[in-house]
Amino acid sequence: MENHLHTIPVRDWLKSPFQPLLISGPCSVETEEQFVETAKLLAATGRVNLLRGGLWKPRTRPNSFEGVGAIGLEWMVRARAETGLKLTTEVATAEHVELCLKHGIDVLWIGARTTVNPFSVQEIADALKGVDIPVIVKNPVNPDLQLWIGALERIYQSGITKLVAMHRGFSHFGDSIYRNKPMWEIPIALKTQYPQLSIFCDPSHICGRRDLLLQVAQKALDLGMDGLMLESHLTPDQAWSDAKQQVTPHALVDLLDQLQVRATSTDDRNFVNELHALRSRIDKVDEEIIQLIAKRMNITQELGRYKRDHNITILQVDRWKEIIDTRTMLADKLGLTREFIMHYLEQLHKESIRTQTRIMNEENGDIASQKNATDSIAP
């Protein structure tokens, strides 16, 4: 999606007096009674803008509940008729799209496991040509911003302008309190590149557990996201899929009431002046930091030449360990998180290795040039 192409802001087609905009409903449509009764409870809250329910569930392993399929569309339509709530469900194939359009589903979403595959996204995009329907595109399961942008581009190029990105976290290796790591820097980068694009957050899939939902939802709102997708079930502990991350409609209202919705701007002149003063101080510090980094890299070049001249390897493991230990200890004393300072040190180290490698290669290039010159005049 090029910067000059504009999508329609979500609040222009999803009207609501409440903040944030909210998509809610069970992870899966299980039975007609389960879905309709949950829908009635959610409608009674007056806070839900779109009623969600999964019909086709892409599961990691076979023999798990993979959704009721097309029959659930009729149950969803009944829920809409009895509650007035608009409907949204996930589509992964052109056939899914056609079935949803036939039943008048109001909004479609593309799941993370589909977004990761450009062939699947293009199939959906082709099925949407000539159709005016809002589409939500979740981020791919792996942390790849360009893949996410590519999926948004494909749907946009099919003629869809009511387009929303959905941040649902990313797969990761190793231990984490999250089911899918938020990696907030990725949706921030997306919003920075396409400020007109509406972005929602799906705390349910990021957290994978109820006790983390509030803090993740609040973080999403603090970052200026336009809405939330929170899974709600009549009896979440008995849910056929993702039971631990779903909440009752009553608990959903409690969560929403605890959220603090912040303004994106203000006309308060005193606030604007103070904000400008604080930002100016940050700008000055950033300039000083960049100058210090440049100074450090100049010293790194000297270091690289010194190692080269004395035939010493670039990587000195003991020295790198010393840097980690001393700098993280200092960071702890100054109130900086170890994760942040390690990321900073790793980037500096990577650039230092790159710089010293270039210096070593320059010497090798000189030696090779001298050898070629000698070979050219050899008898």
Image (tube, grey):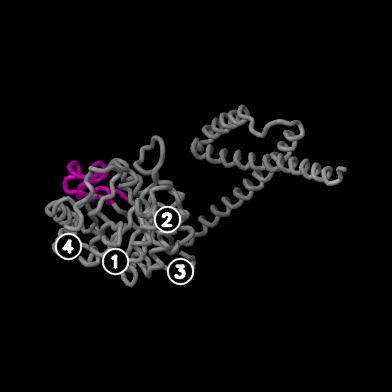
Location of residue 306 with respect to 126 vertically, above or below: above
Image location of residue 179, percent across then percent down: 34, 41
Q: Are marks 4 and 3 in contact (CB under 8 Å)?
A: no
> Is 258 inside the magenta-drawn segment?
yes
CA distance for labels 3 and 2: 16 Å
Front position among marks 1 and 3: 3
Q: Which mark is residue 242?
A: none
Instruction: Characterize the local packing of mark 3: few (<14), some (14-19) or many (20 or more) Cα atoms within 10 angstroms.
Output: few
Q: Are marks 3 and 2 in contact (CB under 8 Å)?
A: no
Q: Earlier in the sequence, mark 4 or mark 2?
A: 4
**Amino acid residing under circle 4:** Val
The mark total stands at 4
Residue depicted at x 45% and y 56%: 190
CA distance for labels 2 and 1: 26 Å
Q: Earlier in the sequence, mark 1 or mark 4?
A: 1
Q: Which mark is residue 5?
A: 3
Instruction: Characterize the local packing of mark 2: few (<14), some (14-19) or many (20 or more) Cα atoms within 10 angstroms.
Output: many
Q: Earlier in the sequence, mark 1 or mark 3?
A: 3
Which residues are the magenta region?
A: 230-259
Image location of residue 189, percent across then percent down: 47, 54
> Is 14 inside the magenta-drawn segment?
no
CA distance for labels 4 and 2: 30 Å
Kindly state the secondary structure of the residue where label 1 is placed.
loop
Q: Which mark is residue 15?
A: 1
Q: Does 96 sit left or right of 337 as displayed?
A: left
Image location of residue 162, percent across then percent down: 35, 67
Q: Which mark is residue 77?
A: 4
Front one among 327 and 235: 235
Q: Which mark is residue 148?
A: 2
